[in-house]
Image (spheres, rainbow, N blue to C red):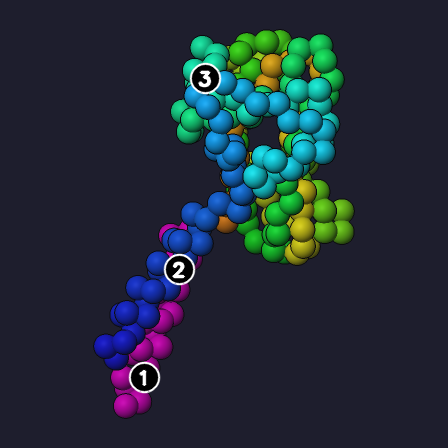
Amino acid sequence: MKTLPKFLLCMALAFSGNAQANLIVNGSFENPVIAAGTFVPYANGSTAITGWTVASGYYTDIISNGFWTTTTPYGSQYLYLNDSGRADAAIWQDVALASGANYSLSFALNGLGNSGSSVSVSLTGAASSGFATRTASSISNWTQFSYNFTPAASGSYRLTFSSPAGGYVMLDNVQINSAVPEPETLALLFAGFMAIGFKRKIVT
């Protein structure tokens, strides 16, 4: 019986650890590291931004704090998706998701208050089931967005951020996390294991 509390503790830690794991690689665009107060452009098709592929765009840059008056609170660098009046910009990353699991997609945007600033977000794949396109525009400060979703099928999904020409859109802190188990779920799990232990004690 002494091993049961240890087992329950391990299960609780496993649940909490899995709930906090970000499935997105380099969601804060901290790699590659660039010099402070500078920017580095990446061309269409580039995979130099760790975990990401540049899909289109005249300018898709990593910018470090100090280059503009705006700075990111999520690290030292952020992604600049578009240059005003140039061309559409997009970037994507593939991520493996499980059917029926609950996930949360979150990201931060800053459009410097430009009325033309907008970004469309899509998560598609695995038998054409995926996340619906979302658009956020006219954002004057760093703003966090979050959406919950449940994939209809297991497999690889493509998360894409795209911005039309004519806007200033900065992206940071991209995350896909497993939904945190409800307290009721953890309570039922604990009660179930306690019942197993109680039954074992009676039998022995």
What amino acid is labelled 3 in the image? Gly
Q: In what element is the residue under mark 3?
A: loop
Q: Nearer the viewer, mark 1 or mark 3?
A: 3
- State which quarter of the image contains the N terminus: bottom left
On the image, the x and y values in percent for residue 198 come to 29, 78
Say which residue appears at 55% left-offset and 49% top-offset.
102
**Structural crowding at the residue carrying mark 2, measured as other residues with C-alpha within 10 Å and reported as few (<14), some (14–19) or many (≥20):** few
CA separation in Å, label 3 and label 2: 40 Å
Name the residue that disc number 1 marks. Answer: 200
- Seen from the viewer's position, the closer of residues 154 and 204 is 154
Say which residue appears at 72% left-offset and 33% top-offset.
45
Main SS category, magenta section: helix
Residue at the farthest right position: 128
- The boundaries of the magenta stretch are 179-204
Q: Nearer the viewer, mark 1 or mark 2?
A: 2
Name the residue that disc number 2 marks. Answer: 14
- Seen from the viewer's position, the closer of residues 34 and 132 is 34
Considering only vertical position in the picture, is 2 above or below 63? Answer: below
In the rendering, which numbered label is found on residue 83? Answer: none
On the image, the x and y values in percent for residue 168 come to 60, 14
Q: In what element is the residue under mark 2?
A: helix
**Structural crowding at the residue carrying mark 1, measured as other residues with C-alpha within 10 Å and reported as few (<14), some (14–19) or many (≥20):** few
On the image, the x and y values in percent for residue 158 come to 67, 42
Is 201 a magenta residue?
yes
Looking at the image, residue 157 sits to the left or right of residue 179; the answer is: right
Instruction: Verify CB contact (< 8 Å) between mark 1 and mark 3.
Output: no
Name the residue that disc number 3 marks. Answer: 37
Residue 115, image quadrant: top right
Count of residue discs = 3
